[in-house]
Image (tube, grey):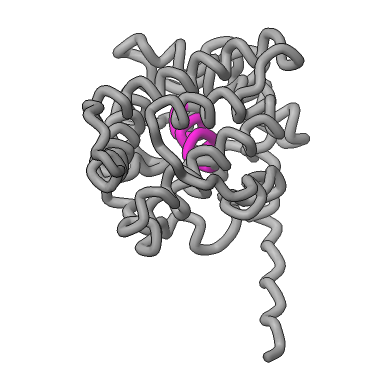
Amino acid sequence: MTEQTPRKLTKGERTRASILDSATELFSKSGFHAVSLRDIAAHAGLTHAGLLHHFPGKESLLIKVLGRRDRVDARLLFEPAVRDRPEKLLGIIVGIVWRNMQTPGLVGLYVKISGEAADPEHPAHDYFVQRYRVLRERLTQALTALFAQADPPLAHDPALVASQLLGLMDGLQTQWLLEPEAVDMHASVVAFLRQLGLTIDFPSPEDVVPGADAVPGADAVPGADVVPGADAVPGPDAVSSGDSPTQAEP
């Protein structure tokens, strides 16, 4: 069977991808509040007006940047084949940790912005609240099944373990950014799951999670917003505040 040739991106799609790349880099380095739309436009080689043609405000641009990677992960975590195989979901989680070790810029972005977003007035506050809520629920479902399937069954509280796992992953990211040669996030997460008594054979990370090249330009790919389980995942436009340029520009 002849493989279908991927459609070339339009000029507008390439421009949007370039803007998102620039926003990701600048937000990662300086945080949300210290970066203006004019900074992002200049970094992307555009005028301020040219950027506003594609994104109406800094808040909406931030959520697009955050949602870019989440759309890739959501396709994996919410695909039908994973729903009935909780061990596969944990394998994907472990693979995502490995993948994150290849993309320090994006890890830095999440660490910096999630810290800022603890402020209820931050434009990404609701995004992160919903993101953690969905992940806790998804992990709790998988862990409930895995603990019951073990022989003998494991007497852990699935909801508590789900929160512990997410907390471990977040804390490891900060330590890894500070001292990457001393912290192995992938090995640490696998060790935590083993200590629970789970006897899952985790596949090679490359076999379950797209590589780092699967993210840049993802927002420009047609159908990138069509995510299985999208009703449960905070979408890229999940911002309640206005997006007018006057509101967004510091």
Query: Where's residue 176, x and y in %?
Result: 64, 16
Name the residue: 27% across, 31% down. 133
| Magenta residues (range) | 59-68
Asked if one can make out residue 137 in the rendered structure from this viewpoint, the answer is no
- Quarter location, residue 240: top left
- State left or right for residue 159 relative to residue 165: left
Q: Does the magenta segment cover residue 150?
A: no
Residue 170 x/y as whole percent: 48, 19
Tell me which residue sits at (42%, 41%) in the image. Answer: 236
**How many discs mark residues in the rendered view?**
0
Q: Residue at x 42, y 47 (%)?
A: 89
> Which of 77 and 140 lies nearest the eye of the viewer?
140
162 or 194: nearer the viewer: 194
User: Is residue 2 placed above or below 169 in the rendered structure?
Assistant: below
Q: Residue at x 44, y 30 (%)?
A: 193
Q: Is residue 236 left or right of residue 83?
A: right
Left-right relation of 12 to 67: right
Residue extending furthest toward the front? 152
Q: Where is residue 99 in the image (x, y as percent from the top left)?
A: 64, 38
Quarter of the figure with residue 129: top left
Please say whether residue 248 is visible from this viewpoint: yes
**Which of 179/86 is in front?**
86
Q: Residue 172's image quarter?
A: top right
Q: Percent x, y for residue 17?
A: 65, 46
Q: Is residue 67 magenta?
A: yes
Q: What secondary structure is the magenta-colored segment mainly? A: helix
Q: Quadrant of the image for the N terminus?
A: bottom right
Instruction: Decide: is 19 above or below 2.
Output: above
Judge whether 33 appears above or below 169 on screen: above
